[in-house]
Amino acid sequence: MIPFSPPHIDQKIIDEVVGVLKSGWITTGPKTKLFEKELSKYCGNKVTLCLNSATSGLETILKWFGIKAGDEVILPAYTYSSTANVIIHCGATPVFVDVNKDDFNISISHIEKAITSKTKVIMPVDFGGYPCDYDLINALVLKNKNEFIPSSEEQRLLGRILVLSDSAHSFGAIYKGKKAGSLTDITVFSFHAVKNITTSEGGAVALNLPFPFDNQSIYNSLCIKTLHGQNKDALSKTQKGNWSYDIVEAGYKYNMTDLSAAIGLVELVRYEDDILLKRKHIIETYLKSLKDYSWAELPVVSSAFEHTNSHSNEDKSSEIHSSFHLFPLRIKGICEAQRNAIIQEIFELDVSVNVHFIPLPMMTFYKSLGYDIKDYPIAFENYSREISLPVFYDMTDQMIQEVIDAVVNSVNKIIHI
């Protein structure tokens, strides 16, 4: 069986983890702090906080911004449950909007229609690693600045809707010359086992708030908030005579461990020149092999594919490069049942595939709140025909070809080409 997305764990990672185990410092410590600094350096944002998951990061920022009952947060209907669940945890209302047909990302025109006086946050999701149109989103919140009604000190200081990017898929993606993490106010990454970079479980909050915010001070306060409200972490308390601490708020237990950070540091060093290149090769091979099939609707993964001349003098600042996290293939002219039958046939050929995602208005919990998938026709249309093909570091060319053959044979069998 060809797996869908196993993590790449080699001897270098094993050695680094063993080194941490032997160091006697396995929880949040020097490795985590170094990882945070290296992430900021890579992404170009101001300060980064590492946590135990992207979900923790999203919820932490919503609560820091004062999101509560009566507030509204706009997000795409086409996303994983974590994006919406954190809004529910704050007592606020998720406002789902439809997505673009071509890239699966949140529709800017639908965002604009959904903004009300209760809107406090917009949470775009970089589907599959392809960045949303942040220039338009950032301009939109400025355009609606006069209608914004703040209800916390942080909201008053910002004076507009916060843009909180769910970039769980897009670490390393580039939008108009800038990396994900530096594209808007705050970005949250995931380092879960199936992501491009893993820390086994983990995530990061990339702070990039504008003046007059002091991002370092916010980082310091978030460190307290995500470690039980304790005003000193374990590393600080190792200093001679520095054992005493205080609990200044009812915080949470969201910190990243040095064991996780050690994995992330190895991954980050080789990310640009190794991991991303391998993922790009897999996806480019899929694109080239499937482009001539009339039933194949190929994903948008990068504007760079339009520039085949490496010596071109064209302005690269207009390009968008995916992080090549997913390959969301759509089959033209089929229904949901046919898609499911194709997936079953592919599995019978010992190839693992997936679906990203079942739109949240189709889920029992969100249906019980009154959401209806009929209100998001593009999200349903994309979902009903989507099959995510395997993309992982250790995938060989032979495996890629086996996946392609399995998909082609299965589609031909079900839709009788």
Image: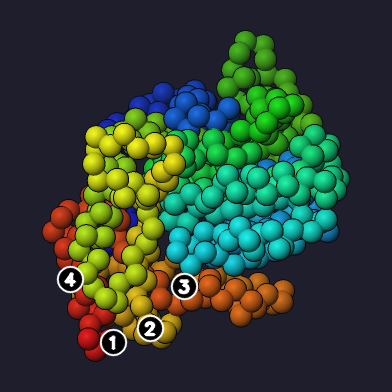
Q: Which residue is mark 3?
A: 383
Q: Is there a contact, CB below 8 Å, between mark 2 and mark 1?
A: yes
Q: Residue furthest left?
A: 398
Q: CA distance from mark 3 to mark 1?
A: 18 Å
Q: Amino acid at mark 1?
A: Ile
Residue 169 vs 263, above or below: the answer is below
- Compare marks 3 and 1 and give the one earlier in the sequence: 3
Q: Residue furthest front?
A: 313
- Foreground: disc 3 or disc 2: 2
The disc placed on residue 415 is 1
Q: Amino acid at mark 3?
A: Tyr
Look at 48% across and 62% down and name the residue there.
104
Q: CA distance from mark 3 to mark 4?
A: 22 Å
- Judging depth in this view, the residue of 155 and 235 nearest the camera is 155
Q: Amino acid at mark 2?
A: Ile
- Compare marks 3 and 4 and give the one earlier in the sequence: 3
Q: Residues within 10 Å of mark 4 (few under 14, many from 20)?
A: some
The disc placed on residue 405 is 4
Q: CA distance from mark 2 to mark 1?
A: 8 Å
